[in-house]
Amino acid sequence: MKRHLNEAIEFGPKYAEAYLFRADWNVQSGKPAEAIPDLYAAYRIDSKRYARAIAIASNVWMDLEKPDSAVACISLYLKTASLTPEKMAEWEKRRTELEFSAQLMKNPIVLNSFSMGAGVNETTAEYHPSFTIDGSKMIFTVRMPYKGGCPGFGSREEENFFESRWDGHQWLPRQLLPGRVNTPCNEGAGCISPDGKFLFFAASAQSDNFGSMDLYVSELKNGSWQAPINLGPNVNGPHWESQPNFSSDGKTLYFVSNRPGGIGKQDIWKTRRLPNGTWAKPENVGAPINTAEDDFSPFLHANQHTFYFASKGHPGLGGSDIFVTELQPNGQFSAPQNFGYPLNTLRDERLLVISADGKKGYYASNAAGGKGDFDLYGFDIPSNLQPEPVTWLNAKVLTEESVDQAFIDIVHLASGDTVVQTSVSFPGGSCLIPLPTGTDYGLTIQAPKHLFHSEHFKLKSTDGGQQQTVQLKKIKEGNEVVLKNIFFDTDRFDLSPLSNSELSRLKGFLIQNPSLRISIEGHTDSRGDKNHNLTLSKRRAEAVQQWLIRNGIQSNRIEAMGFGDTQPIGDNQTEAGRALNRRTTFRIKGL
């Protein structure tokens, strides 16, 4: 074929159509660079008649990642082609987009990409990864040959979930997700909750589908994923819902839908989980995220304000690019920013997942060099593009009596705002809780038939999270609780405002147990005069007592006692030991 075209051009060097045919042959043969001279030649023969040649050249230049040359070609095309006003506007828009692409490609970000390894990537297509907050487990979608068993299923391939675990050095060989989530039909686009207890995902051809694709949730119990539950008619409808992303505070679910009432073709929506466990009517997240085109693949970072998504409607390099925006305190999103080249390319980019510490990004790509179709990759995020980091608290709860659940509240001590409300189930009794670093927190754990337990802590580092094992004591006469979130200034007995959440918790406990009588007991370290310490500890206990009385607890239920430095629980020779000795407690005096 090419030989005949060469002969035609040699015989008739002004035969523009032969140049165009040879250019097309080179493009189709994977030799786009060889097409450029022929396209220019056809244009020079008759720029009016063959203006389309320079328009084609702009596309070829972009395939070669030369946006400046592509822009120059479009400028020539606009000068010489006979275009309607509508077509003129389309090509001017295209030129603006390519000028934007040129700027991105001139200022590339440094990506140290790496494969997720042989344990994850095989000859099948792997995509849509999701991680627990500590990065120890990954669940992802695998597209594999259809094995049959799904009524009315018309595809040769099906999607299923696999999981892999990080052993500290590598991702271990993947395993089919245990339990009842995978079926002979399609399940994909999974999002595991930060604590690893719930999996939100999309599924089609299920018996309880409301539309062509619905959202479901499954709970992990005793190492097995339970039968999925449809999120219901408030979330799912007769249209298409997919790509769920669950916020780290457990309150909001983002997803993608083509339902009516949106801005574009596919829009990003959100729904909030109600106190009774059902889901509110979804809201469109609106502009500036959603456009008249497709906007999809939402990912809210664990810091709860940095939001990533893919879009075909915002200025980008290819069909769809990855963008980032910030959720402002007023509930509005900032103007989305293109994440940059070469993460975004001339191809379609979709989901981007960011680690809790903000240092790693994860994505799927079908670029050359992979093991199969789509493979999973990670990369090091440049420091100037890293989101505010988040770490986690790994809480393990032990009880003296058998219970089904224990309840965990974490408050921001300075503001008193509740940051996290969650629960742990037994057996097991553990959970992972994402939290921003550099903040003072108050932790309270409660369970039926037990005294509550409180701690305060500050997460300083994103490396490794923090472990907390808590032994709850039975409600029993003589048992004592250290009120670790009661604060006083040095050598004073005025309650700090930081104590408010702890005081309210103690008040609530006494209201829930109206027959209990308690003593508030104050303690100091050994520094200073012993008589002064005894008086100071008594007055601190009385400050707590009087607060409770002022807030509705009967005075005959509470006594106040001070012990000074006579009952140490730590070494008074070290600051850590003295800090343990400076404490306020309550003790059960009567049931």
Image (tube, rainbow, N blue to C red):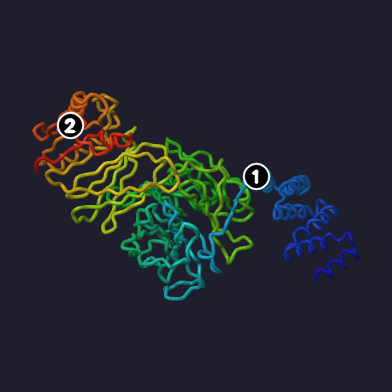
The residue positioned farthest toward the right in the image shown: 11
Residue 401: x and y, percent?
18, 54
Q: Nearer the viewer, residue 269 or 406?
A: 406
Taking the view exactly as shown, the residue that stands out farthest to the bottom is 148
553 relative to 138 in the view: left or right: left
User: Percent position (x, y) of residue 58?
Assistant: 73, 52
Which residue is more in the foreground, 260 or 340? 340
Q: Mark 2 points at which residue?
A: 563
Element at label 2 = loop
Q: Tags 2 and 1 in contact by the CB under 8 Å rule?
A: no
Q: Local crowd at mark 2 within 10 Å, few (<14), some, or many (≥20)?
A: some
* Left or right: where 63 falls relative to 51: left
User: 310 above or below 585?
Assistant: below
| Amino acid tagged 1 | Leu
- Residue beneath the point at 60% across and 53% down: 319
Mark sitting on residue 104 = 1
Looking at the image, which is closer to me, 206 or 116? 116
Residue plotted at (48% across, 69% down): 158
Q: What residue type is labelled 2?
A: Phe
Q: Residues under labels 2 and 1: Cα distance?
A: 68 Å
Q: Which residue lies furthest to the front in this view?
A: 573
Q: Which residue is drawn at 54% across and 67% down?
A: 122
